Image: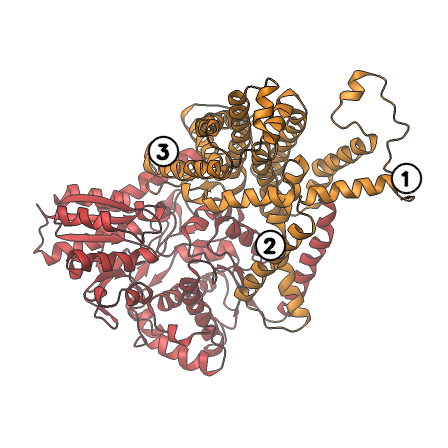
Chain colours: A red, B orange
Amino acid sequence: MIKSFKPALSAVALSLAMLSQGAAAAEEQFFPLIDYRVGPYGSNGQAFYGGFIDYLNYVNIKEKGVNGVQMTWEECETEYNNAKGVECYERLKSKAAKSAGPIHTMSTGISYALVDKSAQDKLPLAMMGYGRTDAVDGSVFPYAFPLVTTYQMQASAIVKFIKDKNGGNLAGKKIVYLYHDSAYGKEAIIAMEAEASLNKFTLVQIPVAHPGNEQGAQWLKIRQEKPDYVVFWGWGVMNQTALKAAQKVGFPRDKMIGSWWTGSEEDVIPAGDAAKGYMAATWNVAGKQVPVIADIEKVVYGAGKGNLQDVAKIGTVLYNRGVSAAVLSVEAIRKGQEKYGKGKALNGEQTRWALENLNINDARLKALGATDLLPEIKTSCDNHEGSGKVKIQQWDGAKWVPVSGWIEGNKSLIHPLFQASAKQYAKEKGITPRDCSKEK
Amino acid sequence: MLYREAGQFKTTYAADQQLFPIRQDRIGVITLLLVAFFAVPLLASEYWFSAILIPFLIFALAALGLNILTGYAGQLSLGSAAFMAVGAYAAYNFQLRIEGIPILVSFALAGLTAAGVGILFGLPTLRIKGFYLAVATLAAQFFIVWCLTKFPWLSNNSSSGVISTQQLIFFGHELKTPVEKYLLVLSIVVVMALAAKNMVRSTTGRAWMAVRDMDVAASVIGIKLMPTKLLAFAVSSFYCGVAGAMYAFCYLGSVEPDGFSLEMSFKILFMIIIGGVGSIMGSFLGAAFILLLPIFLDIALPFFADLFGLPFSSATVSHIQITVFGALIMFFLIVEPHGLARLWQIAKEKLRLWPFPH
């Protein structure tokens, strides 16, 4: 066994040497892309990482990089598998030692496995809309960033949306929380319970076992319970099944509100007619009417450098989400360069500082052409989330239409939950939290 | 010429009964251990430890556990990943709930917990055999994962069901670096592998093999079927449980029940099929093959693509990797249905005759 190490080692060394040859000349900002394009969720990954890479290319072509620093990246395929994700991380780590943008894994499992490692290696880990949500408390998690918003804040925002629809009062109403029985689905329960006791509505929790392509029993229960709303935390094939089942039992789709992983084109189109009127939360709108998306299509695909093989994916919810992740990452690089020297690549520690001091307001978003692609975001040491806002969008049978403005979850209710959980984590791991008042 | 036992006379019972009776084997094993304990920590990079060596050793141990049950005692099981999950969650809970418990004790208790659960799911073996037993152990796979998701107490009320393992304190010293973790995993695996090697040639091991070959005959010669089969389940689950605890503590650092899927059980089963059913060494060879080959292909393919100027995306590489991997499995199974360990055995026999094969 030991004998076989040598040739493999030299193959690794050789391939690394070949990759680094071109890197000598200009300053380059490296992005370790721990992504997935094959496997059960491959099509989601294609759209997300396609958008991500397209925006990096866009910055390289349009502005010649950030203050002259070119964006570079290397992909490593995880197939949404935790062990493979760790292997990829270890492989890309040495390349990211000198300069590193935020790591986006788009997988809760992988990001959980990387939270400790990335802090040890001083590499910033971004978890936009997934991952360890109590990392909002940056005093315990200096290197982890659940940017924009978290499941709990989203659940709270959805409740707020329902409340506004009901004249500001939910007392006596009944809400069913129908969820994917996994880490992802269970994460928001704590927020729903807190909201239920605050707003005095009845909460009925109904789990659906993975993969969720049979939901007869669950919808029978929903029919018996006669809820006013169904808040829906699905994933993959479970989403279309739920919509069809809702149609079958005659539950109105416009009383069903899903999380942001239930609200992409891939979720509703297979459900056909049954999806019409269905609503879902999102932090980025779909469509090409967003100026930067249209411009990417023109500039990047015009130059023949587009990453997507299937150009029909441009402007889908997940593609735009990938662009929104890249916009944040590049803005962090810009911010970091202001502090650490323009025209210089940032290392992991410097990018971490930049992510913690992001301040992107509407004017800046407009200048980027990214209005509605993201809410305003302002991060700090004790708030790694930075926004907590979502929009509700509705499927009209052909496209997603936003039906609300930015809705912020109940921060004073939800953030203490994060802090408590982070505190427990710090205790288990023997971490001394930073003092956020001393951070600048 | 080099590998020949001629002239090695055993003059005591101890010499005759030792674990590796042939001198060349002893030298080989000792060299291997010296390399693993001293040379590898000096030479290998962090990537090798965290991404290759540690998972390889852990899966080798799990495969060894399954090999005891399937290879030696002849009971087919599809629940190895579930027993690993039991080990991982048990170790986590022992660390969490008993103040100051040493990590090795938690690992051992985790193994015992898994052994207990293993005995429970081993009970059906008294009535069912073969493929039907595989289906019964499938129940373990689903039940345990469901159970870990269902009862929040087991994951210390974590809102997501994911547990994040505690620090690894080893005699007052925190094991942080990959090298330290590697040495811990290596020590445990070496001790347990040698124990297994010893066990399978003892009364217990021979009883297992008798049951495997023909259980009616075994009971006729006085082997009690029930304790023998249940012991195999217990020992096998113990090994899987310890492997699971190390998987959580030394490798990933955080695990969720869904991570211990049926797919992982299959992977462990493939390891022993490829490596060699009923062979300690086969477990290691199989784990190496199943774990390392995909990574090797992953790194080598883009390298060759560069060499020939082919435009490979990471997705293409992944597809080719799966294809090549599958083809290689079939190739090996056709060429040597008894696994890699059998190839090694043939090589040894050839070596014995070399250089005068006639």
For mark 3, name the chain. Answer: B
Residue bearing the label numbered 3: B156
Disc 2: which residue: B294
Tag 3: residue type?
Asn
Position of A364 compared to A392: left or right? right
Q: Secondary structure at mark 3?
A: loop
The residue tagged 1 is: B1
Image quarter of the C terminus of chain B: top right
SS state under label 1:
loop
Which residue lies at the image location 62% right of the left edge and 38% below the top edge? B182
Asked whether the residues under marks 1 and 3 belong to the same chain, the reply is yes
Answer whether residue B166 is visible to the viewer in this image: no
**Quarter location, residue B300:** bottom right
In percent of width and height, residue A172 lies at 8, 45
Which chain is home to disc 2?
A: B
Q: Residue at x 33, y 53 (%)?
A: A385
Q: Nearer the viewer, mark 2 or mark 3?
A: 2
